[in-house]
Amino acid sequence: MTRLPDPSVRPAGLADQFGRVARDLRVSVTDRCNLRCTYCMPAEGLPWMPKAEMLTDEEMLRLIGLFVRDGVTQVRLTGGEPLLRRSIVELVAGIASLAPRPKIAMTTNGVGLERVAVGLKEAGLDRVNVSLDTIDSDTFTQLTRRDRLADVEAGLRAAADAGLTPVKVNAVAMRGINDESVADVLAWCLERGYELRFIEQMPLDAQHAWHRSDMITADEIRERLSRRWELTPLPAAERGSAPAERFLVDGGPQTVGIIASVSSPFCAACDRTRLTADGQVRNCLFSNTETDLRGPMRAGATDDELLDLMRGEMWRKRRGHGIGEPDFVQPDRPMSAIGG
């Protein structure tokens, strides 16, 4: 196995050369999805990973356990759509049994959440983020190419009832599609007690059609919301490594968050690392390199050897994602294969 030229210069744990240490692990449990969002994948879908290439539950739990052993304190399960992994409840239970127990969250499109919300909570899931870009049925169907808004709404209600709180909603504003209705989405979430986070659209589509000029910026989102509410920024100290800048809505206590991933990146405080469904560790969402853990693991690598590979990948992490730089190249893997 390949090691860095001088591993002795690296501190213990999942540290990089800029003083950041990974505490937050994003795990893509599948690349499959039951929606076909226009900004993520083509209408016909994508070639899915063969089952033999995907990590088994046992393999995934072993690697997650090593990340936790090396300092990770939160595990977020993503996809594709994580609820399409048939063993998702058992996987959550396995993570919850780790010592020390990490916080466990999930990002889902919510389509299948109603039927498993209670089971996920009982297994140990702490909270959930549901991706929902619009509350208009026609726009939802146009965006996702599926008429499933009612299922997402039912999933959100089920998550709240099961205690997967705070229930958060992630929304992407797109020019000419849903940007003029962002205030309606916030009003809808405020009425139901959901915490809304707007996210700038990022260059992670399978079609590589993203263009910065088409992106609705964080400033534009804030301006649109401010037409209806007074937004008061929360102190920067409360943000920590969280990606969202949060605002009190009309003095609070409810809040809204805006994640300026492109226009005002939070790379300097990033504490994330990523594990794909086929066992690759990535140090950044936008990385064009990754380190294989599945192959060495299946070849008999020890825990210490796997940890060395994880640490080496983190040590290579760049200062920032580089969107907007002349040498920026969009990752080959789309978001559905990397995990959100």
Image (spheres, rainbow, N blue to C red):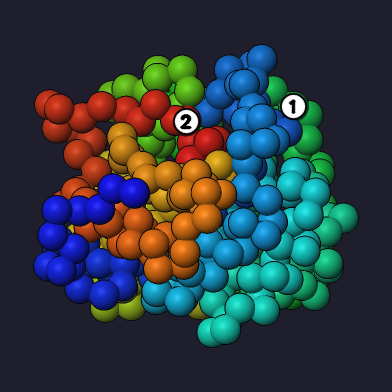
Kind of residue indicated by mark 1: Arg
Residue sitting at 53 percent across and 28 percent down? 40
Picture layout, residue 259 above or below residue 271: above
Task: Name the image quarter holding residue 60.
Answer: bottom right
The count of marks equals 2
Of residue 92 and residue 137, the one placed in the foreground of this image is 92
Residue holding disc 2: 334
Q: Nearer the viewer, residue 183 or 242?
A: 242
Secondary element at image label 2: loop
Crowding around mark 1 (Cα neighbors within 10 Å: few <14, some 14 to 19, many 20+) is some
Which residue position holds label 1?
146
Q: Position of residue 82 (x, y in %)?
A: 67, 48
Q: Kindly indicate the quadrant of the structure image that contains residue 109.
A: top right
Q: Position of residue 251 (x, y in %)?
A: 43, 74
Residue that lies at the very extreme toward the right in this rendered image = 115
Residue 334's spot in the image, x, y percent? 47, 30
Horizontal side of 263 relative to 140 (left or right) equals: left
Q: Amino acid at mark 2?
A: Pro
